[in-house]
Amino acid sequence: MNPAESASGQTLDSMLKKKMPALGIDLGGTKLSAAVVSDFKVISEPRTVPTPHGADNIVSAIVDLIKSFQNEHVLAGAGIATAGVVDPTTGNILGSTGNLPGWEGTPLKTLIESRTMLPIQVDNDANAAAYGDTLAMRMEDKECVIGVTLGTGIGTGIIMRGKVYRGAHLAAAEGGHMRISLGNQRFCTCGLFDCWEEYGSGRGLVATTKELLPGVTSAQSELANHVEFLTTRMITAAADNGDIIAQKGMNIWHQHLAAGIASLAHILDPECFIISGGLSSVVDFELLREMVIDRCMPRYAESVQILHSELGIYAGIIGAAHEVLTHISKPPAA
């Protein structure tokens, strides 16, 4: 045995790096966020910049963020959670959405490693969030855990016995694009109609509430004054203030969430769902469980668990950081 290797096959270098923190980076259509992570905790002040337009500019912004943290921290590596379909082995972007035009085909891992000299891992943002939550909540031994990230859209990640399930073409778990209606009522950013995220996301909550407002006066709902510029924050705040229309919108939104979760439960029979993302904080988990149970066959209804993420809004950042730490600590191939 090489003296630089342990009995488990790990090199001294990999063991040392495992003790070091990693940078987690979350790339979305509007913002690019990063923070230093150790033991499933953010240990630095997070930094956020607007997502620039174009692949070259995005790569440069990521490099700048990494270098700014390298000035203050010794990093084992960096994990990048990005929207789109990713090959986690090569770190290439295989597919993208309209939120990141021109992103498809970017050899992200190679480009960032060559400019930072750090180990880089790249994954889909929902996969990274689900992976981070599964490990943080000590569920890596479970047969199946499904992470659901609620934000502007809906992202899902499937973790089977501690590993991300990626499917035959590395594009598994696009649960946000299950079709939950046949009416061609809502056009999705993916180019299809009536995807789950057009009903169960923040965008869906706004659309649902707008459908309730025609004919409603400002005396009946404070939202009537803001139809053209309605936001999720306006709706949730109004619901908290007792606004009947806002509360009805929230209730229907929970029904839409439950419809997608029940479908996933019937297909994959997971031990649990973990809900993360910015909108997870306004989910009524007891109500959601009741609605999911009502939509499940008895076999599934008996055991369904729906849990709130322990990592919260940082699930993607923390998951991405721990993906690179996991990769670094793997024994070398024989």
Image: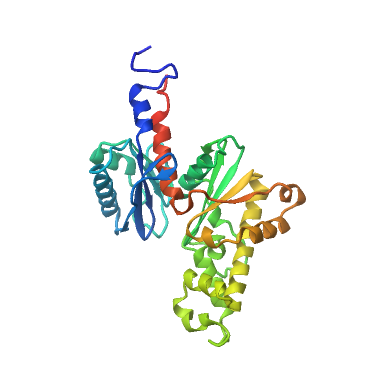
- Which residue is located at x 73 percent, y 58 percent? 294
The image shows a total of numbered marks equal to 0
In this picture, residue 61 sits left or right of residue 321: left
Q: Looking at the figure, which quarter contains the N terminus? A: top left
Can residue 293 be seen by looking at this rendering? yes
Q: Tell me where residue 211 appears, x and y as whole percent.
A: 57, 77
Q: Locate residue 203, reporting x and y percent.
A: 49, 66
For residue 3, above or below residue 107: above
Q: Position of residue 288 (x, y in %)?
A: 64, 59
Q: Quadrant of the C terminus?
A: top left
Establish if 20 lies above or below 157.
above
Query: Viewed as shown, does residue 275 lie left or right of 322?
Result: right
Is 112 positioned to the left or the right of 182 in the image?
A: left
Q: Nearer the viewer, residue 203 or 192?
A: 203
> Which is nearer the eye, 262 or 180?
262
Q: Residue at x 30, y 39 (%)?
A: 110
Residue lying at the far top in this picture: please name it: 1
Q: Is 298 drawn above or below residue 30 in the view shown?
A: above
Residue 169 in sight in this render: no
- For image coordinates 39% across by 60% down, the residue present is 99
Question: Residue 65: horizontal and vertical position, in percent?
Answer: 27, 49
Q: How is the image coloured?
A: rainbow
Residue farthest right in this picture: 298
